[in-house]
Image (cartoon, helix red, strand yellow):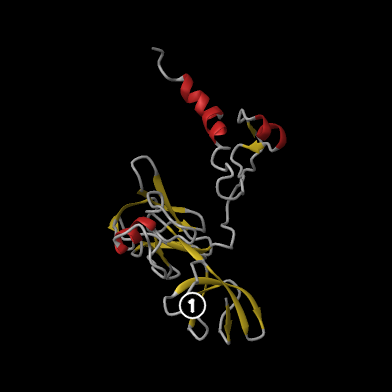
């Protein structure tokens, strides 16, 4: 869609029309702004308002991600289904990526007087029965000395650690999707994944930990192709070997 005289920058999130459909700025030429709308646009007509958020498309990072089902722009589908009372969602509906009201048990890993830098772990949250969420100093933080730290149950928006610079660290971080998340070390996939399907192993080999896509139209068999790799991949074979004999 194209908007006229919109005060926005490239990749800014905008809301289009009276229903507030989410979109993203993909081109700006003069006073014309081209928007990629991430929802069905039928019925939207010229003259409807377009509002810019002034911020790029971002995601919420924090406790609560692992047990939530999202769409492509991190809208929690289970929350929206409850909100709408149906699995069929109306256009323009939205909800925070993670629950802002739920409390989590935060156990500090730092004490007052400790020096911390971006990426340092300041606390642990048991996100699931088997996975601990490590709360870290944000990558864009200046770091500093811990002057206050709390232990207990908090929402993701409450301050759990305060630095001498005045920075307040929460369990929730917001991060632009088009900006690479900094890492201390990143391992590239090098070992082959032996799928047992010759057309893949011979003509389109995959690496363990890598990513592949199978594009195609409806009914062309996209979902059939991964059946063999899933059933015959090494992890499946190893788990089958551990099964007791009858």
Residue at the disc numbered 1: 44
**Residue 3 found in image quarter:** bottom right
Left/right placement of residue 246 relative to residue 31 reads left
Q: Quadrant of the N terminus?
A: bottom right
Tell me where residue 114 appears, x and y as whole percent: 43, 56
Picture coordinates of residue 232, whole percent (x, y): 55, 27
The spot of residue 23 in percent (x, y) is 52, 71
Instruction: Please give the count of numbered marks on the rendered protein.
Output: 1
Q: Which residue is drawn at 59% across and 58% down?
A: 180
Left or right position of 60 against 150: right
Which residue appears at 43% of the width and 68% of the height? 167
Q: Nearer the viewer, residue 10 or 84?
A: 84
| Residue furthest top in the image | 246
Left of 64 or right of it: where is 232? right
Residue farthest right in this picture: 203
Per the image, label 1 sits on a secondary structure element best described as: loop
Residue 146 seen in this snapshot: yes
In front of the other: 4 or 210: 4
Q: In which quarter of the image is the C terminus?
A: top left
Q: Is residue 101 visible?
A: no
Instruction: Count neighbours of disc 1 (C-alpha within 10 A) and say few if under 14, some if 14 to 19, many if 20 or more.
Output: some
- In the image, residue 240 lies at what x, y percent? 47, 22
Residue placed most toward the observer, 233 or 107: 233
Image quarter of residue 5? bottom right
Please tell me which residue lies in front, 28 or 224. Answer: 224
């Amino acid at each position: 869609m194209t908007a006229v005289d919109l005060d926005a920058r490239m990749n800014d999130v905008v809301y289009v029309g009276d229903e507030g459909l989410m979109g993203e700025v993909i081109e700006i030429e003069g006073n014309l702004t081209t928007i990629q709308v991430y929802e069905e646009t039928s019925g939207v007509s010229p003259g409807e308002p377009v509002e810019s958020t002034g911020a790029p498309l971002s995601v919420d990072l924090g406790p609560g991600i692992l047990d939530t089902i999202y769409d492509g722009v991190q809208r929690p589908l289970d929350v929206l289904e409850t909100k709408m009372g149906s699995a069929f969602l109306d256009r323009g509906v939205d909800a925070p990526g993670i629950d802002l009201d739920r409390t989590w048990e935060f156990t500090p890993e730092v004490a007052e007087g400790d020096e911390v830098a971006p990426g340092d772990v300041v606390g642990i949250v048991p996100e699931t029965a088997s996975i601990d969420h490590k709360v870290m100093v944000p990558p864009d933080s200046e770091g500093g000395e811990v002057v206050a730290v709390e232990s207990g149950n908090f929402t993701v928006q409450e301050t759990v650690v305060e630095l001498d610079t005045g920075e307040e660290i929460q369990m929730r971080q917001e991060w632009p999707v088009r900006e690479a998340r900094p890492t201390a070390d990143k391992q590239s996939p090098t070992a082959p994944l032996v799928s047992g399907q010759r057309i893949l192993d011979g003509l389109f080999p995959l690496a363990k930990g890598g990513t592949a896509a199978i594009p195609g139209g409806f009914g062309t068999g996209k979902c059939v192709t991964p059946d063999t790799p899933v059933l015959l991949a090494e992890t499946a074979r190893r788990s089958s070997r551990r099964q007791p004999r009858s």
